[in-house]
Amino acid sequence: MEPGDFKKWRKAMGLSQKDAAHALGLKRRMIQYYEKGERDGEKVQIPLTVRLACYALTEGVADYRGPHRKVIMSETVRKEKEPA
């Protein structure tokens, strides 16, 4: 993801720099660095973790709490589902 792509992503998502920073767990200043592509005259790479987070947000994933756990049906629900 290039700096211009990052800025296009943010705008397409309708996010301000402040909102993008909050959604990505970053400081607003980092958003500015990523959009500019440099920090104090040095080139800045957008980390893989940030690129993946951008993709997740695009797909509607705002948080991830781990794989879904198998839910064990209660005895009452299990009996209701059994054929008579």
Image (tube, grey):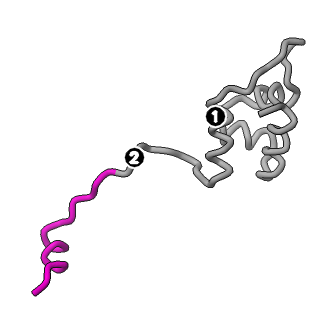
- Image x and y of residue 59, in percent: 63, 53
Residue under the image location 81 percent in, 51 percent down: 12
Instruction: Give left or right: position of 5 versus 71.
Output: right
Quarter holding the C terminus?
A: bottom left
- Looking at the rendering, the stretch of residues picked out in magenta corresponds to 69-84
Residue toward you, 20 or 41: 41
Q: Earlier in the sequence, mark 1 or mark 2?
A: 1
Q: Is residue 77 magenta?
A: yes
**Label 2: how many Cα within 10 Å (few below 14, some 14–19, many 20+):** few
Task: Please state which amino acid type lies under the numbered disc 2.
Answer: Pro
Q: Is residue 66 magenta?
A: no
> Which residue in the protein does label 2 denote?
67
Task: Calculate the distance from the C-alpha at mark 1 to the C-alpha at mark 2.
Answer: 21 Å
Q: Position of residue 31 (x, y in %)?
A: 78, 31
At 19% from the left and 73% from the top, the residue drawn is 77
Q: Which mark is residue 48?
A: none
- From the viewer's perspective, is residue 65 above or below residue 77? above
Side of 56 where 9 appears, left or right: right
Identify whether 1 is placed above or below 61: above
- Nearest to the eye among marks 1 and 2: give it: 2
Could you say whether the residue bearing mark 1 is in a helix, strand or loop? Answer: loop
Q: Amino acid at mark 1?
A: Gly
Disc 2 is placed on an element classified as loop
Where on the picture, by quarter, is residue 37? top right
Q: Residue at x 83, y 39 (%)?
A: 5
Residue linked to disc 1: 25
Residue that sits furthest to the bottom in the current view = 84
